[in-house]
Image (spheres, rainbow, N blue to C red):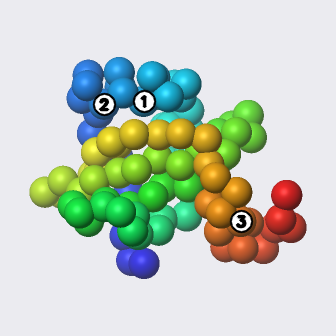
Amino acid sequence: MAVAIRWLDWTERDETHVTRHGVRVSEVNQVLGNPHVLAKNPKGTDNSLFLIGHTDGGRALTIVVSPTNDTSVWRPITAYASTQEHVNLWNSRFNRRKS
Protein backbone atom coordinates (compact mmCIF):
# COMPACT_ATOMS: atom_id res chain seq x y z
CA MET A 1 0.00 0.00 0.00
CA ALA A 2 1.63 3.22 -1.18
CA VAL A 3 0.02 5.64 1.24
CA ALA A 4 2.12 7.85 3.48
CA ILE A 5 0.14 9.57 6.23
CA ARG A 6 2.14 12.55 7.45
CA TRP A 7 -0.51 14.45 9.40
CA LEU A 8 -3.87 13.84 11.09
CA ASP A 9 -6.52 16.52 10.67
CA TRP A 10 -8.39 16.55 13.98
CA THR A 11 -11.79 18.10 14.60
CA GLU A 12 -13.23 18.62 18.05
CA ARG A 13 -15.81 15.94 17.27
CA ASP A 14 -13.06 13.45 16.34
CA GLU A 15 -11.17 14.18 19.56
CA THR A 16 -14.31 13.68 21.64
CA HIS A 17 -15.16 10.42 19.89
CA VAL A 18 -11.67 8.97 20.33
CA THR A 19 -11.55 9.83 24.03
CA ARG A 20 -14.90 8.07 24.56
CA HIS A 21 -13.07 4.88 23.57
CA GLY A 22 -10.45 5.42 26.25
CA VAL A 23 -7.79 6.63 23.84
CA ARG A 24 -5.99 9.95 24.20
CA VAL A 25 -5.28 12.15 21.18
CA SER A 26 -1.60 12.10 22.13
CA GLU A 27 -1.62 8.28 21.91
CA VAL A 28 -3.03 8.41 18.38
CA ASN A 29 -0.33 10.87 17.37
CA GLN A 30 2.31 8.57 18.92
CA VAL A 31 1.08 5.64 16.79
CA LEU A 32 1.47 7.77 13.66
CA GLY A 33 5.03 8.68 14.68
CA ASN A 34 6.02 5.09 15.48
CA PRO A 35 6.35 2.10 13.12
CA HIS A 36 2.82 1.31 11.94
CA VAL A 37 0.85 -0.68 9.41
CA LEU A 38 -1.86 0.60 7.11
CA ALA A 39 -4.58 -1.82 6.07
CA LYS A 40 -7.79 -1.42 4.11
CA ASN A 41 -10.86 -1.14 6.30
CA PRO A 42 -13.11 -3.90 4.94
CA LYS A 43 -16.21 -2.27 6.44
CA GLY A 44 -15.34 1.24 5.29
CA THR A 45 -17.30 2.83 2.49
CA ASP A 46 -15.15 5.96 2.25
CA ASN A 47 -11.74 4.45 1.40
CA SER A 48 -10.90 4.46 5.09
CA LEU A 49 -7.87 2.62 6.41
CA PHE A 50 -6.75 1.03 9.65
CA LEU A 51 -3.64 2.66 11.10
CA ILE A 52 -2.22 -0.01 13.42
CA GLY A 53 0.68 0.50 15.77
CA HIS A 54 1.89 1.10 19.30
CA THR A 55 2.07 4.10 21.58
CA ASP A 56 5.35 5.10 23.18
CA GLY A 57 4.19 3.10 26.20
CA GLY A 58 3.60 -0.05 24.12
CA ARG A 59 -0.20 0.07 23.92
CA ALA A 60 -1.42 -1.45 20.64
CA LEU A 61 -4.03 0.76 18.98
CA THR A 62 -6.05 0.70 15.79
CA ILE A 63 -7.10 4.05 14.40
CA VAL A 64 -9.63 4.30 11.60
CA VAL A 65 -8.62 7.13 9.29
CA SER A 66 -10.42 8.68 6.35
CA PRO A 67 -8.80 10.46 3.38
CA THR A 68 -8.90 14.21 2.84
CA ASN A 69 -8.17 16.20 -0.32
CA ASP A 70 -4.46 16.08 0.59
CA THR A 71 -3.10 12.54 0.13
CA SER A 72 -0.70 12.93 3.06
CA VAL A 73 -3.34 14.27 5.48
CA TRP A 74 -5.97 11.93 6.90
CA ARG A 75 -8.81 12.42 9.36
CA PRO A 76 -9.02 10.15 12.41
CA ILE A 77 -12.54 8.76 12.77
CA THR A 78 -12.18 6.50 15.78
CA ALA A 79 -9.56 4.60 17.75
CA TYR A 80 -9.56 1.58 20.02
CA ALA A 81 -7.35 -1.13 21.52
CA SER A 82 -6.14 -3.32 18.66
CA THR A 83 -7.71 -6.71 18.16
CA GLN A 84 -5.41 -9.74 18.19
CA GLU A 85 -5.82 -9.92 14.41
CA HIS A 86 -4.47 -6.38 14.07
CA VAL A 87 -1.61 -7.06 16.51
CA ASN A 88 -0.71 -10.15 14.46
CA LEU A 89 -0.74 -8.06 11.26
CA TRP A 90 1.63 -5.54 12.85
CA ASN A 91 3.85 -8.33 14.18
CA SER A 92 4.06 -10.02 10.78
CA ARG A 93 4.97 -6.74 9.08
CA PHE A 94 7.80 -6.11 11.52
CA ASN A 95 8.84 -9.76 11.90
CA ARG A 96 7.91 -9.90 15.56
CA ARG A 97 6.74 -13.00 17.39
CA LYS A 98 3.02 -13.20 17.96
CA SER A 99 1.93 -12.30 21.46
For the residue marked with disc 3, what is the amino acid?
Asn
For the residue marked with disc 2, what is the amino acid?
Asp
Q: Position of residue 7 (x, y in %)?
A: 35, 46
For the residue marked with disc 1, what is the amino acid?
Val
Can you identify the residue that label 1 sits on? 18
Can you identify the residue that label 3 sits on? 88
42 is higher (above) or lower (below) than 10? below
Can you identify the residue that label 2 sits on? 14
Camera sees residue 26 = no
- The answer to whether mark 3 and mark 1 are in CB contact below 8 A is no
20 is higher (above) or lower (below) than 7? above
75 is higher (above) or lower (below) than 98? above
Between residue 48 and residue 58, name the one nearer to us: 48
- The answer to whether mark 1 and mark 2 are in CB contact below 8 A is yes
Image quadrant containing the C terminus: bottom right
Q: To which quarter of the image does residue 30 belong?
A: top right
Q: Of the residues under marks 2 and 3, which one precedes in the sequence?
A: 2
Residue at image x 53%, y 49%?
62
